[in-house]
Amino acid sequence: MLTVEPQLWRATSDNRLLEDVSAGVVGASVSCDPGRDATWALDATVTADLWESLTPFLDWVAPVLVVTWPDGTVRRDQLGLYMVLDSPETHGETGATVRLEAGDHVWFLSTQGFVGDLSARAGSRRTRLAEQLLKTALLNPRFAIPDDGGNEKGLKRDREWERGISRLDLCNQLLRSGGYYPLWATKTGVLTTRKRGERRLRHRTPMKSWTANVPAGFDAFPFAAPPAGLGSEVVGTIDTTPDSADLVNEIVVVSDDTGGRIRSNARIRNRNGANPRAVYSGQNRTRVRKINHPLLDDDDTAQQIANAYADELSTTNSTIRMTVLPDPVPDYVRANVLVGVWDAAGRPVAVGQYAVHRVEYGLTAGDALMTVDLGRIDDADDVLGG
């Protein structure tokens, strides 16, 4: 038998768990989506008693999910760290509840600005500038910005920014123009990033496998077996979207430093002209996607960014949403998974390697499942052309 125990802890901004306040939770869910300004989002309704024990803008809360597999294996992990905000109350005849509003460290960074204009000298390394912005942020957020081993290129000219820019936007401008992903928060509230070009999507190690009704002898993908005692972790229905037309034929990375465009050789196209998805190339038309990177100033980095975007955009062509048994341990941010799902008649529903777009965890006893939004990863060799 699988058992699930959701918990909610009062915590500090540096992730010290202080008190289990789960008894005051009426219902809750957590979602993780690195594509939005707040990586982690908490949706919770709590009792008035719990609300009165929390202090908005001072207290933080940390959901924890404990899952015990039928074989006794315990899977436990935290699912974000959130600052408690002033929240709306609902009063009834016999009591009151509060819709708890809270924001993670990425959201909190987006609320912070500067007292004056800023500048950086030519030669400054983008990651070191981003680190300095984080070191001087409120509440001393924990962060881990990877070192590019001394290969990072500095700014080619002096730069200036007006005070109206947010601390998060400036950090992300610097990181994105250096070929990094925008900042995201880990499960425990550490701000981090990594290079977009670290291995093409299709060649990254999948974080997890979800399978159902795999035909005997099928070995095209190295699916991992479900946990002992479980025939499959997939539950409920699976929603799929049809293969859409290719989103773009060409990616152009736009910079303000070269007097116009840094045009890469990366294109999204189908080599098979008979493929019905080749709408634009088949009709001798092109569709260009322009992506603005204000601080980008070298062609090599532009090419790396364009290649990475080609991979990422390809994962929006064919997507699925499915519900699975919860596993809080894997880190699904910017991750790949393997999916091998066939129906009872042996028809393939979703088979291949997928990029994780969004994950939602139910944190109440009656809805302790996990919903995942995934996008199929196309073969990079077919997607990218010269």
Image (tube, grey):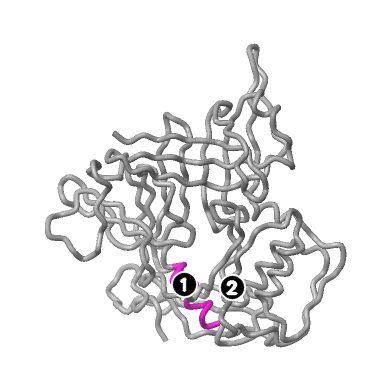
In the depicted structure, whether residue 298 falls above or below residue 146: below
Percent from the top left, x then y, of residue 384?
40, 79
The numbered mark at residue 237 is none
Seen at 46% across and 56% down, the residue is 331
Percent from the top left, x then y, of residue 285?
44, 77
Count of number-bearing discs? 2
Label 2: few (<14), some or many (≥20) within 10 Å? some
In this rendering, does residue 207 appear at all? yes
206 horizontally vs 305: left or right: left
| Quadrant (top left/top right/bottom left/bottom right) for the C terminus | bottom left
Reading the image, the residue beneath label 2 is 291
| Quadrant (top left/top right/bottom left/bottom right) for the N terminus | top left
The magenta stretch is 302-313
Seen at 35% across and 56% down, the residue is 208
- Of helix, strand and loop, which one carries label 1? loop
366 horizontally vs 167: left or right: left
**Magenta stretch holds residue 61:** no
Q: Nearer the viewer, mark 2 or mark 1?
A: 2
**Most foreground residue, 87 or 271:** 87
- Of helix, strand and loop, which one carries label 2? strand
Which quadrant would residue 300 be assigned to in this image? bottom right
In the depicted structure, whether residue 4 falls above or below residue 178: above
Percent from the top left, x then y, of residue 205?
36, 67
**Most foreground residue, 29 or 1:** 1
Residue furthest to the left: 216
Q: Earlier in the sequence, mark 2 or mark 1?
A: 1
How far apart marks 2 and 1 lie (CA) works out to 12 Å
Q: Look at the numbered discs 2 and 1 and tell me whether their residues touch, using CB distance below 8 Å.
A: no
Which quadrant would residue 217 be assigned to in this image? bottom left
Which amino acid type corresponds to the residue marked 1 in the rendered image?
Answer: Val
Reading the image, the residue beneath label 1 is 248
